[in-house]
Amino acid sequence: MHDSFETGLPQNSANYTPLSPITFLKRTAFVHPHRTSVIHGKHRWTWAETYIRCRRLASALSKRGIGKGDTVSVIAPNIPAIFEAHFGVLMTGAVLNTLNIRLEAETLAKIFEHAETKVLLTDREFSPQIKVALSKVKRDILVIDIDDPETESGEYLGMLEYEAFLAEGDPEFEAVLPEDDWQAVSLNYTSGTTGIPKGVVYHTRGAYLLATGNVLAWEMPHRPVYLWTLPMFHCNGWCFPWTITML
């Protein structure tokens, strides 16, 4: 049966845009550039500064050949780097894989292999188990060390430190938006309590809708001050990195 409402009304860039949580950051940086985005110890950033840092991360990753379909893993507590990865990694079209900091080396190695990790951002605090995990992996992984000034750190495992890596990036990098709503943006794993960890994929539409749904479910006000107690490695912090940015 012919549907007259589809005649002359094909889907195109003028009437359809895939939903993506990275658009929250671009808007907030434009509307509230001078408002505080992140406080970590003595360090403070504005939304404009956070946007630049995320664009630098995306650019630096892109220069290393990272793009759609690639996996970037991150193991870190709730620090700025893991928050920035929720945008910078996605801006390349790649998939973010946040890792449970309590996992042992053998499990981490299996995740690196299964996820086909190409880049690992690792807080030096977890260098003991990461060093062992990497020794068990049969693939090449670019390791970027995160040197968190708020904690005692372990040894360097990679060739680059996170801030130096950001410095390689272009602050004007244009984000690569998803081609459709079904494109993967995040890969999370179970903790392996009942066997080998199992991967769960978020698509860009799901991440966007859950982030907005948090506002309704928790009756959140505009411009909240959010204390990061929920780990961002746990289901992407229930998508709150994107929710808080949106508000």
Image: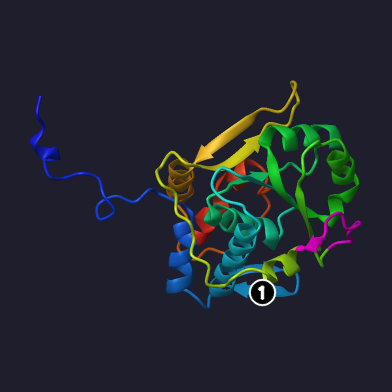
Q: Residue at x 63, y 31 (%)?
A: 199
Disc 1: CA contacts within 10 A as few (<14), some (14-19) or many (>=20): few
Q: Is residue 158 magenta?
A: yes
Instruction: Inspect the image, locate mark 1, and give the three-letter code of the amino acid beneath it.
Output: Arg
Judge left or right: residue 214 versus residue 11. Answer: right
Q: Is residue 189 magenta?
A: no
Residue 80 x/y as whole percent? 68, 62
Residue 183 x/y as whole percent? 47, 41
Which segment is the magenta one? 151-161
Judge left or right: residue 34 versus residue 229. Answer: left
Q: SS at mark 1?
A: strand
Measured along the vertical axis of the image, is residue 134 above or below residue 158? Answer: above
Write down the residue under mark 1: 44
- Which quadrant of the figure has residue 134? top right
Judge left or right: residue 199 versus residue 77. Answer: left
Residue 140 x/y as whole percent? 77, 44
The residue furthest bottom is: 34
Colour theme: rainbow
Residue 226 appears in the picture as rendered: no
